[in-house]
Amino acid sequence: MTATLEARVRPGGPRARPGRRPPLLAAAGTLVVVAIALAGPLIAPYGPAERLGLPFQGPGGGHPLGTDFLGRDVLSRVLWGGRTLVLTAIGATVVATVVGMTAGVLAGLASRRTGEVVSRLVDVLTVLPALLLILVLAAGFPGSDLAVVAAVALATAPFSVRVLGAATRRIATTGYAEAALARGDGKWAVLLHDVLPNIAGPALADAALRLVAALHLTATAGFLGLGRGAPTANWGRMVSENLSGASLSAAPFLAPTLLLVLLSVCVGLLADRFAGIASGGRR
């Protein structure tokens, strides 16, 4: 009986296991949506631009989700429409993380004056509306997904610079980093052996948060018709295209909306989990 009571109160015992379910469910949800987005074109029954019926037909007749405003198969459009959006968001997140890591580490290790200059530049970029950056770059390079990637990365990178710069300064002022410099280790050695390993957790958590923001901004760009144009399928554009026929058929705009919401929520839960791990707490 004593062993049973110990198992109930032990942090790693049976009562702690349910706490692991939300991260596992979030990871599973993320993998499912990403798999649909990346592998969808391989299993889509029709092409994204094929007109197969009347506009806004209900489910049936070989169209499980009905047809959209041009009579195209909604299921096929959904399977085709996620790849560009997800890859664009991931690409923007990678660029933002690399820029944020590089600038943040340099600002954290540089002199106080240099760090202040970097902080002022970051503040200037932070106050610019993200949507304005996307509109300006996308208008300058119409039909380019790379312009959307650059705009989203430019809008999200300043926050990474702040977070990782603060983490770098905190590590650089600790006793063991100062001791390494005092015994003759160069700044490069301190960076590789002391700073980077200790900011890996915050960097991972920040990257997950940037991915959530990138998904929202990329979907917004698609909703506004930015990036690669029609007839290319895009979950964000599908919502705007089919919203007018919501009273006739909900599936054409509801299916991509639910996938976007599911992916954003799951990635957000994982980001929260990573942030808890990086801060040393348990969630």
Image (tube, rainbow, N blue to C red):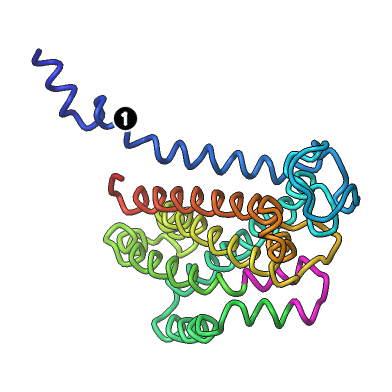
Residue 153, image quadrant: bottom right
Q: Which residue is mark 1?
A: 17
Magenta segment, which residues?
Answer: 138-153
Magenta highlight on residue 140: yes
Q: Is residue 52 above or below residue 116?
A: above
Query: In front: 201, or 93?
Result: 93
Residue at image x 55%, y 82%? 125
User: Looking at the rendering, which quadrant does residue 41 occupy?
Assistant: top right
The answer to whether residue 32 is magenta is no
Kind of element beneath mark 1 = helix
Magenta: main secondary structure equals helix
Q: Position of residue 158 (x, y in %)?
A: 52, 74
Q: Is residue 262 above or below residue 228?
A: above
Q: Is residue 223 above or below residue 254?
A: below
What is the tally of numbered marks visible in this picture?
1
- Left or right: 10, with 20 as reference point: left
Screen quadrant of the N terminus: top left
Residue drawn at point x = 69 percent, y = 67 percent = 223
Q: Amino acid at mark 1?
A: Arg
**Quadrant location, the C terminus:** top left
Q: Nearer the viewer, residue 210 or 72?
A: 72
Q: Is residue 243 left or right of residue 168?
A: right
Name the foreground residue: 261 vs 218: 261
Residue 221: image location, x then y, percent: 68, 69
Q: Position of residue 242 (x, y in %)?
A: 73, 61
| Residue 272 as seen in the image, left or right of residue 131 | left
For the question of whether residue 193 can be seen, the reply is: no
Query: Is 71 situated left or right of 104 in this image?
Result: right
Image x and y of residue 248, in percent: 71, 56
Structural crowding at the residue carrying mark 1, measured as other residues with C-alpha within 10 Å and reported as few (<14), some (14–19) or many (≥20): few
Q: Can see residue 107?
A: yes
Q: Residue furthest left?
A: 2
